[in-house]
C-alpha cells in the first residue's frame, strides 16, 4: 500500500472501547515501545510504504516520537483534529521537526526508495501471480 497509519488507541467516551475501559484496564495501555515495535514491523514488511505515525501522538513525548521515527515511521497526519481525536497543532509539529532535524516531504509524491534499496543492499522484487490468479482479481 502507499501508506499505513499506525495508531495508539485513544479512548473516546461514548464508543464501545471508550466505555469499556473501566472493565478492561489493559485495553488502552499501548506504550511507546509497543508503537515502536509495530512501526519497525511495518517498515520491514512494507519497505516502500509511507508508515504514518497517527492517532495517539499526543500521548507520547518528543523523545518517544523520535524513537518511533528512528524505527521507521516517515510520515505523520497533521492538522488539529483526526476523525475523533485531537492532534498536535501544525506549529507544534513544525517545531518538533526542527528540533529533531527533520525536513518535511511535500504531500502526495508517492513512495520513496529506502536507502538500503538505492544502495543495492536490498532488492525489492515483484512476484507475478499465475494467469488464473490474475484473472480472478481482474
Image (tube, rainbow, N blue to C red):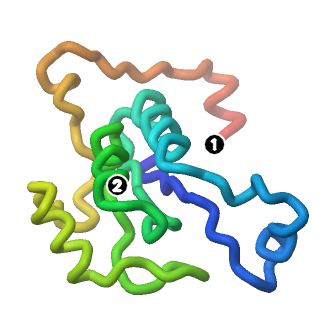
Picture quadrant of residue 40 = top left
| Front: mark 2 or 1 | 2
On screen, residue 136 above or below 132: below
Q: Secondary structure at mark 1?
A: loop
Whole-percent x, y for residue 81 in the image: 46, 84
Image position, residue 29 (x, y; %): 66, 54
Locate residue 138: give its quadrant: top right
Query: For mark 1, does the 10 Å Cα neighbourhood hold few (<14), some (14 to 19), or many (20 or more) residues?
Result: few
Taking 12 as reference, is 98 above or below it?
Answer: above
Q: In terms of image quadrants, where is residue 21?
A: bottom right
**Which residue is tagged 1?**
138
97 vs 3, left or right, is left
Q: Position of residue 84 (x, y in %)?
A: 60, 82
Q: Secondary structure at mark 2?
A: helix
- Look at mark 2 in the image and give the residue it sits on: 65
- In depth, the one of 94 and 60 nearer the eye is 60
Q: Residue at x 43, y 53 (%)?
A: 3
Residue 2, image x, y percentages: 41, 50
Q: Relative to the observer, which residue lies in front, 105 or 69?
A: 69
Q: Residue at x 21, y 82 (%)?
A: 91
**Label located before the other in sequence (2 or 1):** 2
Instruction: Give the residue displayed 67% in from the left and 27% down from the top.
Output: 133
Of the pair 127 and 4, the residue shown nearer to us:
4
How many tags in the picture?
2
Please tell me how crowded label 2 is: few (under 14), some (14-19), or many (20+) other residues with Cα within 10 Å: many
Q: Is residue 41 left or right of residue 51?
A: right
Amino acid at each position: 500500500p502507499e501508506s499505513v497509519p499506525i495508531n495508539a488507541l485513544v479512548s473516546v467516551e461514548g464508543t464501545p472501547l471508550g466505555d469499556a475501559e473501566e472493565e478492561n484496564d489493559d485495553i488502552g495501555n499501548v506504550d511507546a515501545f509497543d508503537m515502536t515495535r509495530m512501526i519497525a514491523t511495518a517498515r520491514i514488511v512494507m519497505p516502500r510504504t509511507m508508515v504514518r505515525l497517527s492517532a495517539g501522538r499526543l500521548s507520547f513525548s518528543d523523545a518517544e516520537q523520535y524513537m518511533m521515527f528512528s524505527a521507521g515511521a516517515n510520515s505523520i497526519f497533521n492538522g488539529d483534529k483526526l476523525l475523533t481525536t485531537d492532534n498536535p497543532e501544525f506549529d507544534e509539529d513544525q517545531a518538533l521537526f526542527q528540533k529533531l532535524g527533520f525536513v518535511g516531504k511535500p504531500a502526495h509524491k508517492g513512495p520513496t526508495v529506502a536507502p538500503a534499496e538505492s544502495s543495492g543492499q536490498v532488492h525489492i522484487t515483484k512476484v507475478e501471480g499465475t494467469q488464473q490468479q490474475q484473472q480472478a482479481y481482474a
